Image (cartoon, rainbow, N blue to C red):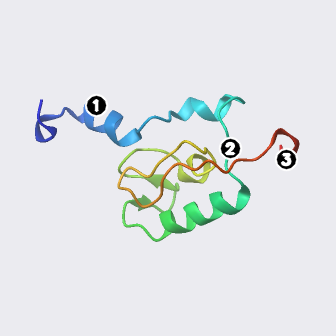
Amino acid sequence: MAEDNLSLWQQYKKNLGTTRPWDLLDKNVPRTTDEIAKKRLEICNGCAHLTKLTQQCKKCGCFMHLKVKLAPAECPIGKWSKVEEVKGPESE
């Protein structure tokens, strides 16, 4: 199926990427450092696709103040990507 012919659900899943909202509940999913999360959120705050009131992305539907903390998360339009630099267990 061509990208133009994706259903709304398929588009949502594609934009969501490989991370899922419930990954926030999984302690095994690595977290970014606070510095990286802050930089990611600053990028999101300058984006036209962010709903400022809820801090929710119009492209992937995620609450960005939470998604930016997940190391494997990526911006659906490529403004930031997954990182290898993560918090250690002693930081939590």
Position of residue 22 in the picture relative to residue 52 (left or right): right
Position of residue 54 in the picture relative to residue 76 (left or right): right
In whole angstroms, how far apart are the C-alphas of marks 2 and 1?
27 Å
Say which element carries label 3: helix
Position of residue 23 in the picture relative to residue 76 (left or right): right
Identify residue for label 1. Answer: 9
Near mark 1 (Cα within 10 A), the count class, few <14, some 14-19 or many ≥20, is few
Identify residue for label 3. Answer: 91
Q: Which residue appears at 45% of the width and 34% of the height?
A: 18
Q: Which residue appears at 43% of the width and 60% of the height?
A: 50
Q: Quadrant of the C terminus?
A: top right
For the residues bearing labels 1 and 3, Cβ distance under 8 angstroms: no
Identify residue for label 2. Answer: 31
Q: Nearer the viewer, mark 1 or mark 3?
A: 3
Say which element carries label 1: helix
Say which element carries label 2: loop
Near mark 3 (Cα within 10 A), the count class, few <14, some 14-19 or many ≥20, is few
| Residue 76 image position (x, y, % from top left) | 38, 49
Q: Quadrant of the N terminus?
A: top left
Question: What is the quadrant of residue 28 in the picture?
Answer: top right
Q: Is residue 87 above or below residue 50?
A: above
| Residue 31 image position (x, y, % from top left) | 68, 44
Question: Which residue is outermost to the front?
Answer: 84
**Which callout, 1 or 3, points at the residue further toward the start of the chain?**
1
In whole angstroms, how far apart are the C-alphas of marks 1 and 3?
36 Å
Amino acid identity at mark 1: Trp
